[in-house]
Image (spheres, grey):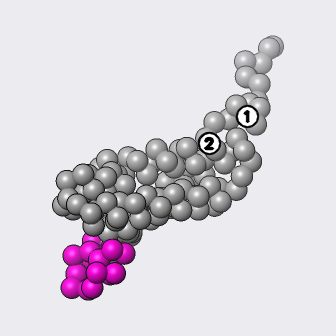
Amino acid sequence: MSSDRSPSPKPDDRGLGCRELAVSAGVLVAFGVVATAIGLLLALGDGGRITQQIGFALYGAGAPISGIFAAIAGELPLAPFTDVIVWLVLAVFAVRIGERRRVPLRQVLALVVAAASVLGLVVSFLIERA
């Protein structure tokens, strides 16, 4: 009798790991939600100018698409579904980059959060100028 079992996959052929993807998506979406919530509280609160700028930076870092819309429109719109989609896509890319370059996932996620923070600073500057 012959066996119909397929050969075991090679390490490179196994695709994305579910655990890594779940951790990556959870961390990035949680960062987005928390940064956006704190950013909106600070930006719309009664604090001074510095507090408002920090709020805009957190808002732009946590909600990148909404932050870009805010920089263009001059108001604080929310596009939560598109922002979550951006974080989920970035989570997939983070896992892929980590696996291909053999970099620990936490380092890749730290790089993504740092890049989002830089984007938030740029968005904050643009919102202040609008």
Q: Pick out the residue farthest to the top.
A: 1
Q: Secondary structure at mark 2?
A: helix
**Residue appearing at x 31%, y 60% in the figure:** 126
Horizontal and vertical percent for residue 96? 62, 42
The image shows a total of numbered marks equal to 2
**Residue appearing at x 69%, y 44% in the figure:** 99
Quadrant where the image shows the N terminus? top right
Amino acid bearing label 2: Arg
Amino acid bearing label 1: Asp
Quadrant where the image shows the C terminus? bottom left
- Determine whether 3 is above or below 8 in the image: above
Residue placed under numbered mark 1 in the picture: 12
Residue placed under numbered mark 2 in the picture: 96
Which secondary structure type mostly characterizes the magenta part of the structure? helix
Horizontal arrangement in the rendering, residue 8 relative to residue 87 (left or right)? right
Q: Is residue 48 magenta?
A: yes
Horizontal arrangement in the rendering, residue 53 relative to residue 29 (left or right)? left
Horizontal and vertical percent for residue 88? 44, 48
**Residue appearing at x 73%, y 22% in the figure:** 6
- Determine whether 38 is above or below 26 in the image: below
Q: Pick out the residue farthest to the right.
A: 1
- Residue 22 visible in the displayed image: no
Distance from Cα at disc 1 to Cα at disc 2 = 11 Å
- Residue 105 visible in the displayed image: yes
Q: Which residues are magenta?
A: 40-55
Using the image as rendered, state which of residue 93 and residue 66 is in the foreground.
Answer: 66
Horizontal arrangement in the rendering, residue 87 relative to residue 107 (left or right)? left
Horizontal and vertical percent for residue 91? 51, 49
